[in-house]
Image (cartoon, rainbow, N blue to C red):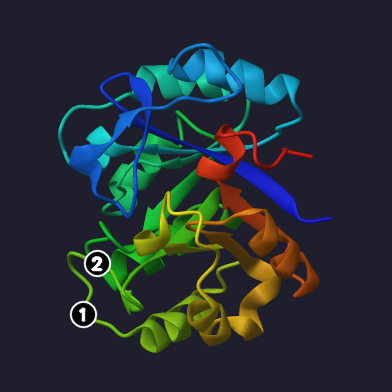
Amino acid sequence: MIKKIPVLDLKDGQAVSGKSGLRDTYQPLQTVFAPSSNPVEIAQGLKLNGADELYIADLDLIESNGHNINDIKLVNTIIPVILDAGVKNAESFSFFLNYAFKIIVPTETLESLDDLYEIFEKYPKERTVVSVDVKNNELFSKNLDLTLHEFKEVLADIGATQIILLDITGVGTNQGYNKELLKEFEDMKDNLIIAGGLNKDSIDELQELGIKKVLVGTSLHSGEISII
């Protein structure tokens, strides 16, 4: 059975929703799991409905515009959090280990490959998740000048065992998974977590393909699909 990990994007102290990574247009999240966009209330509702992990992206931290770290630490006492806080280097990775169960190293904000190697040398792999951020089928990064194939070779070299394939273009669209992207990483499928625009049909397809985990936001919060 494929594992569905709920997604929360946080901005200004509340959960928000939007499409295609256009963060300036995000609105307060409406979800079937809580009567408000309060992240703690939503986490409680998710746990009552069977969630045992929760992906949180702190959009304020990612954009260097404040943070929601205290709410995240509280949510982590309710459901173990997989946190995207815009990690840039080993120092910031170490800091966020105090606030969440697992920490994401996203290509969007990672400063260098040296930092990635340092993180994998110093810290437990079971608490380290690499997010391969993709826009228009190309690696999305502020600092890395690499193709998807080149970065895939780096992932193999460091022995990454938890890899999010995040198609930013598909976020919030319910259009399904990026087949071209998945094909590029097919030989790593046991380690993949697929994300970005997933709907019920695409999750069923991914299960048939042998994918073990997906991140789901819009289709879960709307009630289209269930956690278990």
To which residue does mark 1 refer? 145
Residue situated in front as seen by the camera: 117 or 13: 13
Asked whether the beta carbons under mark 2 and mark 1 sit within 8 Å of each other, the answer is yes
Above/below status of 103 relative to 209: above
Residue situated in front as seen by the camera: 83 or 1: 1
Provide residue 140's location: percent of width, then percent of height: 28, 68
| Residue at 25% across, 22% down | 12
Above/below status of 130 relative to 23: below
To which residue does mark 2 refer? 141
Residue situated in front as seen by the camera: 70 or 220: 220
Quadrant, the C terminus: top right
The quarter of the displayed image where residue 63 is located: top left
Provide residue 134's location: percent of width, then percent of height: 36, 69
Provide residue 168's location: percent of width, then percent of height: 36, 60
Q: Secondary structure at mark 1?
A: loop
Can residue 217 be seen in this snapshot? no
Q: Residues within 10 Å of mark 1 (few under 14, many from 20)?
A: few
| Residue at 46% across, 86% down | 153
Q: Residues within 10 Å of mark 2 (few under 14, many from 20)?
A: some
